[in-house]
Image (tube, helix red, strand yellow):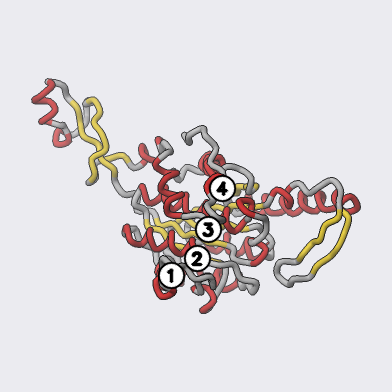
Amino acid sequence: MLEEHPLRLDDLLSEGKLDFQWLARSLVQGMQFGAHRSSVRGHGHEFLSRREYQPGDPLKFVDWKYWARSDQWFVKEFHRETNRTAYFFLDRSDSMNFGSGALNKWLYARALVACLVATLESARDAVSLHSFQSGQDEVEADDVPDPNFSPELIQSAIESAQIPSARPDHYDAIYLALQHLPTRKILQPEAAIQNPTEWAKPQGLSILLTDAFLPEESIMKWCADLKSMDHEVAVFHLLSPDEWDPPEAGECTLREQETGAELELEWSSVRQEYLKNRDLSIARLEDGFRREEVDYCRIITNEPLNEALQKFFEIREIV
């Protein structure tokens, strides 16, 4: 169960920036992962707790030292690795860079990935970070220099984040990559789904975070290819509050994020049509994901992070 206090991005931003590693690990430490811990509870390497002995428990796991002190029979339990490989895919198209401050979809998506990565880190699962982007552009870091990290170190982190690993320093690289990975206007989703065997092993867990302004057929093909490899596939569909529930009236400027084209209009004249098209588009997505047996979770970026995570955990048991 997640802690009840809402974890909002606007409360966590410091001078417009967010430390993803601090956010993720702080959040995970404040959460109770009962379902996940029970699923990885066993006789592994790291001591977890004791529980009362039950008939049938192997005697080799009895805590004899505790028995000598208390004359009570208890067995030791340990964390064990789940051996899951998780692949996170970020939609890096420029439309994701919409919304101001904590409502920005790109900021929210990266924060959400950081939190999910941290939950998998606690279970020692191998993780990798990818994007729907190909070629050298995929590993370019943000153009804004960070005085705490050299461009070479950031570049190395973004590249190494694409190779699944459960090493502690690999998680550090993923958090650093999330901190600096920028959006890009030129998007080539086909490059990420053309041949999944080049980057994914069978029976993995693949999670896509997108605002679904990609071609619908590309998203569905990506899901179908991964399902054919026995992957569990989940999609976070992120929308800003203004995209989900636009104003009743007032002038606004609509900007096509991918091309920069702008259109001046009055919301009162187009709002109903917009909502109708929104609902039709979402219904098509939901139908497609249902056919492919893909878990679908719609998130509005004003939702607290822990509530978004809880919503996701309720539809699939990855933690």
Separation of disc 1 and disc 3 at Cα?
32 Å
Q: Of the two numbered discs 1 and 3 on the same chain, state the one appearing first in sequence.
A: 1
Q: Residue at x 70, y 69 (%)?
A: 258
| Image position, residue 225 (x, y; %) | 55, 64
- Which is more foreground, mark 3 or mark 2? 2
Q: Residue under circle 4?
A: 9
C-alpha gap between disc 3 and disc 2: 30 Å
User: Mark 3 touching mark 4, by CB under 8 A?
Assistant: no
What's the mark number on residue 154? Answer: 1
Amino acid type, callout 2:
His
Horizontally, residue 304 falls left or right of residue 199, namely right
Asked whether the beta carbons under mark 2 and mark 1 sit within 8 Å of each other, the answer is yes
Who comes first in sequence, dot 3 or dot 4? Answer: 4
Q: Which residue is mark 3?
A: 227
Name the N-terminal-most of marks 3 and 2. 2
158 in relation to 277, above or below: below
Q: Which residue is mark 2?
A: 180
Instruction: Count residues near mark 1 (Cα–Cα under 10 Å), then give few for <14, some for 14-19, many for 20+.
Output: many
